[in-house]
Amino acid sequence: MAVTDHVDLPTFMEGVKKRNAHQPEFVQAVQEVAEDIFDFMQDKEEYHAQQILRRIAEPDRVVSFRVCWEDDNGNVRVQRGWRVQNNNAIGPYKGGIRFHPSVTESVLKFLAFEQTFKNALTGLPMGGGKGGSNFNPKGKSVREIMRFCQSFMTELYRHIGADVDVPAGDIGVGAREIGFMFGQYKRITNNFTGVLTGKGLEWGGSLIRTEATGYGAVYFLANMLATKSEDLNGKTAVISGSGNVATHAAEKIVQLGGKVVTLSDSGGYIYDPDGINQEKIDWVKSHKTHRRGRIEEYVDAFPGASFHAGKTPWGVPCDVALPCATQNELLGDDARLLITNGCKAVSEGANMPTDLDGVHVFKAAKILYAPGKASNAGGVAVSGLEMSQNSERRSWKEEELQQMLKDIMLGIHKSCLAYGDQGGGYVDYVKGANIAGFKKVADAMLAFGVV
């Protein structure tokens, strides 16, 4: 085998930045992984010779397309759509579709890159992908959303398939949008296959898919606390977001005896010193899902709470924190404030919600800190189980799926321990997750040769 000169991390990252100019989110995601992988690869010549990390950091393909649709006034509207297929070394591409005005190629490339490692950690045969559009569903009628989804799928259908690429939902894409897209896929192809996950229970969906990401993040948090002989009972939790992930994370923390005191959206956060119990969580779910309301209206329904406009909740004293909103919502100064206020553990429910400065702060403080690729893998894990159910033409019971989810999150935790144990009682979960996910994908790539 040819011996390859080993480039150092700064040289590698300079190449990544040059090849992906003006794509800061993607560069950040690669940097966070590469910091850990370079140490791991030092004595593994085969990874260097075969340029494995370089290949993983270059998507298999990025498909970009125009999406034309008509609004309710008959005006022609034009958006841009993408599907990023990052790596299929261990299975079909798998990852959500996001509809939000902040969607760019950089955002989707970072998400697909992260998804590659996250899916590997689940132990299920799934590669990494992500897609979406800069379409904003807020303020649109149901018929406008339907027309957009149909137009989006009219282009996307040729790039996906049950054994090729299986998208799911993400921000702005729930069961309604999945239904519109699946209906169009079925209409075009005349095939009823498991080409999308997050489907309705009546037509191939899986139980607990809605709860899985939030529940999984809390299960992972509980696994981390257990290494210190602690649990969530009596712990105060600060949560960002108020959508599917955040509300179900709050729900599971309450079930395990914790007290949730914050939720948020893009307008600010609410602080409820009395605790956000199940009744209040149910109100938030209904308010956000059915009325498409804002979190600030919580204080009208529950006057004991306060709303803090334009702010994130990281200054609220807590025992545990769960960022469940979006990328780069928890910055370095926020991380320092959490630690100053006594936060013991952070479990990410969103994808890359902590910026690099914040990651370094948590690592330096040696608190229990779980990166999203490990702690929020519960959602895609149950999506993978939905794929299995679709292939078998069957549905598993809720009790079976709940146990499978717990087992998968425990398995991810064990993988992180295997590669992240630094001795002295400290586990670097970021390093553990990055190495465990990388090794599985890398070894599969070695088996296939240079492709």
Image (spheres, rainbow, N blue to C red):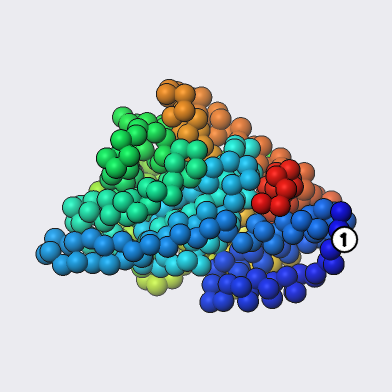
Residue 393 percent location from the top left of the image: 42, 23
Rendered residue at 40%/72% (across/down): 310
Neighbour tally class for label 1: few under 14, some 14-19, many 20 plus, Cα within 10 Å: few
273 left or right, relative to 444: left
Name the one closer to the observer, 315 or 390: 390
Residue 102 percent location from the top left of the image: 40, 68
Residue 69's image quarter?
A: bottom left
Decide if residue 9 is in sight here: yes
Callout 1: helix, strand or loop? loop
Instruction: Tell me: residue 69, above or below residue 212.
Output: below
Amino acid at circle 1? Val
Instruction: Tell me: residue 310, above or below residue 59.
Output: below
Residue 359's image quarter?
A: bottom right
Residue 185 percent location from the top left of the image: 32, 43
Residue 424 percent location from the top left of the image: 84, 52
Residue 282's image quarter?
A: top left
Instruction: Tell me: residue 311, above or below residue 163.
Output: below
